[in-house]
Image (tube, helix red, strand yellow):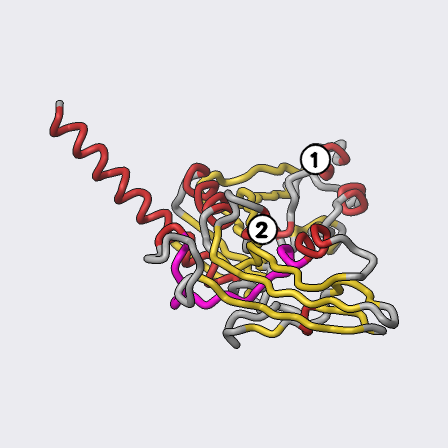
Amino acid sequence: MEVKVNFLTGEEMELKLEGINPALANSLRRVILREVPVMAVDELEVKFNDSALHDEIIAHRLAMIPLKTPLRGYNLPEECKCEGAGCPKCTVTLSLSKEGPHTVTSGDLQSSDENVVPVSPSIPIVRLEKGQKLELTAFARLGRGKQHAKWQPGIASYKYQPIVRVDPGKCDGCGECVEVCPPGILQPSDGKVVVGEVDKCILCRMCEKACKRRAVTVSFDDSRFIFRVESHGSLKPEQLFLQAVEILAEKCREFEKLVGKLEEKG
C-alpha cells in the first residue's frame, strides 16, 4: 500500500491510498468512527442548579463537548484495575461553579488534568441570569464511538480515484460540460476542453450527460482512493488515522490466532 498526503491541517487531512481494495478502505473508515478511544464526559454530579435547563439537558451538553485526549496515560474503564469505579488512571474530573449573570461556556470547566480540556473554550452550556447558580462535577472517561456518539472522534470518508478523459478528436469546445461540472474541474483551452484537478471530481457524470459528442468519459480506479479524515479536535487527524491502522492490525492478529486455534482443533 502506498500513502500520499494531499493536505494536512490541524483538523482535516486528505490522503491518497494506492494498492488496496474497497474492503480495507472501508475498514479503516469504520475503525476511525467506532474504535478509536477518546475522552468524553460520562458521569455528572450536580450540586446546585437553578438555571433554565434541567440537569439532564446540561449533562447532555457537557457530554457532547469534545475533549483533548492524550494518546497515552489513561485506561479504558473496562481495562482499568479499578474495574470502572473511577480512579486517576481512567477518570478526569471537570468542576464548574458559576453565578449569574453569566453565560457558562466550556472554558469555565476546570480540569484535574491540563492535557484533558475542552477543544474549544467558547462552547455555550447555559445562560445564568442574576441570582442563578450552577455548581457541578463532571467525570470524563475514555470510550469508543460504537458505544455512544459522544466518543466519536471525527468523521472519515473515501471515494474511488476519479478518471476523467476528454477525447480531443471528438471535442468541439462547446463548453456545455464545463457549465454543468459542479466542482469546476473542466476548463476551456484553445478551442477544446481540458481536465484540471481531477481529484475534486465527485463522479456525478453530469459532464458525460451534457456532452452530445460523447467526448467526455468518467470512470474510476477501484485500487486507488482519496481518503479524508476530519477530527472533532480530541486527536489530530493524522493521529486518528495511525491509531485506526494500529487497531485494525491488532484485530487482524487476533483473528489469525482464532483461526489458528480452529485449525488445531480440526
Query: Which mark is drawn over residue 104?
Result: none
Q: Are marks 1 and 2 in contact (CB under 8 Å)?
A: no
Q: Secondary structure at mark 2?
A: strand
Residue most toward the front?
A: 47
The type of residue carrying mark 1 is Glu
The answer to which of 158 and 194 lies nearer the viewer is 158
Q: Residue at x 52, y 51 (%)?
A: 227
Q: Main secondary structure of the magenta part?
A: loop
The type of residue carrying mark 2 is Ile
**Is the residue marked by circle 2 packed among few (<14), some (14-19), or many (20+) residues within 10 Å?**
some
**Magenta stretch: residue 112 in it?**
no
Q: Residue at x 72, y 65 (%)?
A: 123
User: Residue 232's x, y, as percent?
Assistant: 60, 59
**Is the residue marked by circle 1 packed among few (<14), some (14-19), or many (20+) residues within 10 Å?**
many
Residue most toward the top?
A: 266
The answer to which of 161 and 34 lies nearer the viewer is 34
User: Residue 106's x, y, as percent?
Assistant: 68, 68
Extent of the magenta region: 62-77
Circle nearer the N terminus (1, 2): 2
Q: CA distance from mark 1 to mark 2?
A: 31 Å
Q: Secondary structure at mark 1?
A: helix
Q: Which residue corresponds to mark 2?
A: 155
Q: Nearer the viewer, mark 1 or mark 2?
A: 2
User: Residue 187's x, y, as percent?
Assistant: 73, 53
The answer to which of 172 and 240 lies nearer the viewer is 240
Task: Judge left or right: residue 28 versus residue 175.
Answer: left
Q: Which residue corresponds to mark 1?
A: 208
**Magenta stretch: residue 72 in it?**
yes
Q: Quadrant of residue 121?
A: bottom right
